[in-house]
Structures are given as structure tokens and as C-alpha cells.
Amino acid sequence: MTRRIALLKTWALVAATSALTAFAQEDYPTRPITMLVPFPPGGVADAVGRPVAEAMGRYLKQSVVVENKGGAGGGIGMAQVAKSKPDGYTMLMALSSLVVLPEADKVLKRAPMFQLDQLKPIARFSADPTVLVVNADSPWKTYAEFMAYVKSNPAKVSFGSSGNYGTMHVPMEQLKVATSSHMLHVPYTGAGPAVMALLSGQIEALSTGPASVAQQIKAGKLRALAHWGEGRLAALPDVPSLKELGVSITYAQWSGLFVPANTPTAVVDKLRQAAKFAASDARANQAMVAAGTSFMFQDMPEFERYVQTDAKDMAGLVQRIGKVD
């Protein structure tokens, strides 16, 4: 009898706990949510993350607070979210370097900062080709002039990035391989610091998403020479693609929302709805256009497939690039 009573009490406790958990998930969110951007302010993830966070906050009726945490090409912040509590209160606004860094760790034979299966995709918000830019005071008016100088002066031209194997580094390594050229890589903690270095003359070039440099191009401080897309960009219609210029390479810098892998389904569903709302919100769309980009939304099922395909493609690219300093 005593054992039977004990079992009944245990079942009652389990049932009560399950009910409380279900209630908590249905009631989510009950406090502010952190959206971690794994780069300093001024980059694409930040430019996309802030209007998305504001719109999602209005939908969820709780503040979504953007927290910038740069380092290791975004790896430090990505790893923090991958290992955080899966309760829906910590989200990640990642760039496409998310699928590159685990493979780069393999190439470098070091312990991975995180694995892709530690994170669950929620939605993609943007997918822009990166743009090759130089200081407007530089002597290069065209891509042909720039590349002619690069080839005549091996390892003299320096380019900045957000860190090794990041979304600003990989396309430049692609370009180096495709053109058999040599340039000096100077990594920074994010796109913002790299762009400031270009503006101040510390480096000669960089490749980044339009949102990081659109305002400086419009202000006449930077000059866009080419981009890694398939056709002309709406934000930069006069800038040719590398394919047009005879260099058959492409690269897309996408941004997307992730949560820890074991986040409850009910919470994930609410975040999906909030993400859809943000992508259709007029205020958020205006902010994206002002930043030099636009929404290219994918909901979770499509985005999951997209991430898997991109991870496979980027793994091959990282292997071809190999170990870099």
C-alpha cells in the first residue's frame, strides 16, 4: 500500500510538472527576450537584427533586446547561444558564417566552438551578395584597375574582414583563388570596425553585404567595384557582378534567426509567427531598405533546407581554401 501511494504521488507530481511546463510554454514570453548579434554594431547582422527585434517585440508584447557580442568571426556569440538554455529567451541573429565556422575548425584541427545541430533555424530574413568596395580616394575607379594593381603588387593590397572564415573573408579568398592573386588579410571583430578601417585608410579593400556600406557609398566615401551576385543589385544598379566581369564566383551573405536546438515546439511556433510578422511589417521593411537591403524571408522548413544545402556547399569551399592565417 505504501509503495502504491508513493507511485501515485510521483505520477501526480509528473502530471503537475508537465501541466505547469505546458502552461509556461503557452504563456511565453513572460519577460524580455535577448537577441544576440555575434558581431559589433555596424554590420549586416546588426542592421537586420534591430528592426526585426523591434517588430518581433511588438508581436510578442515583450521587449526583444539586441545584445552585440563580437569575436572569432561571430563564433563566440554563436557558441554562447548554442549552449544557452533552450527556453526561447535567448535567440541568435546569425550570418552565413554560421555554416562555415564548424568546417573551418576541422581544417584548423581545433575543437569546434559549436556544432550546427546545436541550433534550430527559425527564419531567414536576408540574402545579399557581398560587394567589393574601396575608399573613394583610392586610384581604382573600376574592378579591372583594382585587379591589375593587385596582380602587379602581390600581397601589397590589404583587405579587412570580420574574422577568419567569416562572411567578409570567404568571398575574398574565393576571389584570390579564382584570379590567382595575392592580398593581405587583416581580420577585425566585425564589419563595423572593418569598414571604419577602410574609411580611415588602414586597409585598401573589403567585401561585405550592401547594408554595411550602402550609406558610405551614397555619401561618396566608398566606391563599389563589383559584387558576388548573379545580376545587378537594386541598391547598386551601376555595379557589375564578378560574373559579368569574367570571374565565375558567387557568394551570398544571409542573415537568419536561430534558437538552441531543444527549444520547445510551442515556443518555436510563437517565434516563427513573430518572425513572419516582422518580415511583413511596414516599419521593419522601411528600416531594411534604408539600410541598403530588403527582406528575402524563408520560414523554418524552407530555411532548414537552405541551411543544410549551404553548409554542404561551404564545407567544400572551406576545404578548397584550406588553412589560412
Image: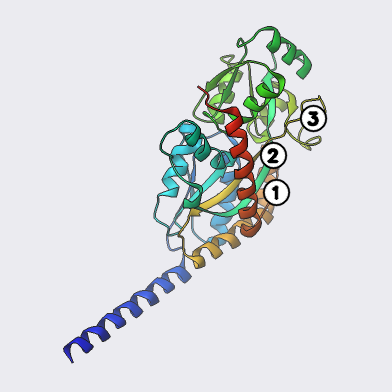
Relative to 3, say whether 185 is above or below: above
Which class describes the residues within 10 Å of circle 1: few (<14), some (14-19), or many (20+)?
few
User: Which of label 2 and label 3 is nearer to you?
Assistant: 3
Q: Hey, which residue is sitting farthest bottom in the picture?
A: 1
Q: Please state, as top left, top right, bottom left or bottom right, where the N terminus lies in the image.
A: bottom left
Residue 156 as seen in the image, left or right of residue 71: right
The picture places residue 324, in percent across and down from the top left corner, at: 53, 24
Image disc number at residue 243: 3
The answer to whether marks 3 and 1 mark residues whose Cβ atoms lie closer than 8 Å is no
Image disc number at residue 296: 1
Q: Which amino acid does label 2 sit on?
A: Asp
Q: Hey, which residue is sitting farthest top in the picture?
A: 152
Residue 113 as seen in the image, left or right of residue 187: left
Which class describes the residues within 10 Å of circle 3: few (<14), some (14-19), or many (20+)?
some
Nearer to the camera, 87 or 52: 87
Nearer to the camera, 204 or 315: 315
The picture places residue 187, in percent across and down from the top left corner, at: 52, 24
Secondary-structure class at tag 1 = loop
The picture places residue 137, in percent across and down from the top left corner, at: 69, 13
Q: Which amino acid does label 1 sit on?
A: Met
- Residue at the disc numbered 2: 128
User: Which of label 3 and label 1 is nearer to you?
Assistant: 3
Secondary-structure class at tag 3 = loop
Relative to 129, say whether 86 is above or below: below
Relative to 198, say whether 128 is above or below: below
Residue 129 as seen in the image, left or right of residue 58: right
The answer to whether marks 2 and 1 mark residues whose Cβ atoms lie closer than 8 Å is yes
Locate residue 14: give its quadrant: bottom left
